[in-house]
Image (tube, rainbow, N blue to C red):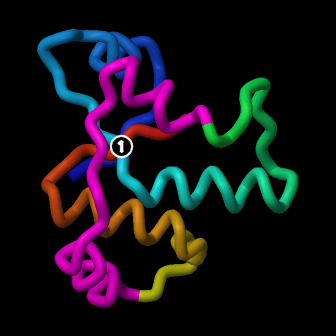
Amino acid sequence: MCRLLANGKTISEIENPLNTIYISRATFFAIAIKINIGRLNFSIPYSNVESILLKTGFKLIELDVNHLQTYTGLPLHANLRDPSDKLLLATEIANHLTHITH
């Protein structure tokens, strides 16, 4: 697994119809938290975010016990203190996925 920044190359990978782009249920948890604490604003209602992403081709990964088991095995790390970020990382590790961020 590697962490990629969303730049021109990764944007083209996301837009490539031959690639499957997954989004974790944990992402929606993280979005809700950031909206709640004022760190994120959307021009659309939060209730529409999931349906819009799924309509654009993202595949949803529901959380399961394997993701939570991976979470419990992640070491404490100074750069990974946010529980929602850590849950996203655990989901990606458990599913052998690449992480793309802004």
In this view, 55 is above or below 58: above
**Dot 1: what SS?**
strand
The structure residue drawn at horizontal position 36% and vertical position 22%, both measured from the top left corner, is 10
The structure residue drawn at horizontal position 22% and vertical position 80%, both measured from the top left corner, is 65
The structure residue drawn at horizontal position 27% and vertical position 88%, both measured from the top left corner, is 73
Mark 1 is on which residue type? Answer: Ile
Asked whether residue 62 is drawn in magenta, I would say: yes
Q: Mark 1 highlights which residue?
A: 23
Which region shows up in magenta? 48-75
Q: Residue furthest right?
A: 38
In this view, 54 is above or below 46: above
Q: Position of residue 74 (x, y in %)?
A: 33, 82
58 lies left or right of 46: left
7 lies left or right of 39: left
In this view, 44 is above or below 79: above
The structure residue drawn at horizontal position 48% and vertical position 81%, both measured from the top left corner, is 77
Asked whether residue 69 is drawn in magenta, I would say: yes
Q: Quadrant of the C terminus?
A: top right
Q: Position of residue 8 (x, y in %)?
A: 43, 12
